[in-house]
Amino acid sequence: MHKILLIGMIFFISACNANESVNSVATAQPYIGLQERQDRKQIQEFVGVDPVNTEWCAAFVNAILEIDGIPGSDSVSAAPLMARSFLLWGEPVEPEDIQRGDVVVFPRGNQGWLGHVGFFVEEQNGSWLILGGNQRNEVRYDLYNPRTALGIRRYKDVDATQQK
């Protein structure tokens, strides 16, 4: 009986210390289908910027992280609305170690400061399924080429890490 209780406690503790960003995909799912023009007011209230006049992918990721109780890119950058601000956030992850909920930054356009950011969902036939805001002007899933990723980042809870 004590062994069962001990195993249960270990499982519970490890679940509490699991990577918190994994929850971000589930947190973002209720927003799938919101379109920047049709649902402009709702998106603006959620992310804090006008989605018609501002690139809002980073604002969406930051809003989801805030719901999950995770500091966003504003904790590491003076320009948290820039997708590439997430290259300074969290801890780097190697492509072979990517997990559901990791934040992935991609280039966008021809200027080096432009980018796109979203949450990794899964690998599909060599592409990465990413859930994000401002993907074709809405919250949706899209496939991206993993070779073009500028960086993969994962939030590390310092307190949980120290408790292990």
Image (tube, grey):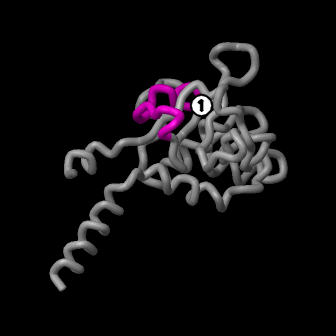
| Residue farthest toward the right in the current orientation of the protein | 38
In this picture, is 8 found above or below 122? below
Residue 82 shown in magenta: yes
Q: Quadrant of the N terminus?
A: bottom left
Which portion, as a residue range, is magenta?
80-97
For residue 59, which quarter of the picture?
top right
Left or right: 155 in relation to 146: left
> Which residue position holds label 1?
105
Give the mark count: 1
In terms of depth relative to the viewer, which is nearer, 78 or 8?
8
The residue positioned 65% from the left and 14% from the top of the image is: 112
The residue positioned 47% from the left and 49% from the top of the image is: 21
| Residue farthest toward the top in the current orientation of the protein | 111
Residue 132 visible, this orientation: no
Left or right: 42 in relation to 103: right
In terms of depth relative to the viewer, which is nearer, 75 or 22?
22
In this picture, is 55 found above or below 43? above
Left or right: 1 in relation to 44: left
Residue 15 visible, this orientation: yes
For residue 29, which quarter of the picture?
bottom right
In terms of depth relative to the viewer, which is nearer, 72 or 117?
117
| Residue farthest toward the left in the current orientation of the protein | 2
Q: Which element is circle 1 on?
A: strand
For residue 151, which quarter of the picture?
top right
Q: Amino acid at mark 1?
A: Val
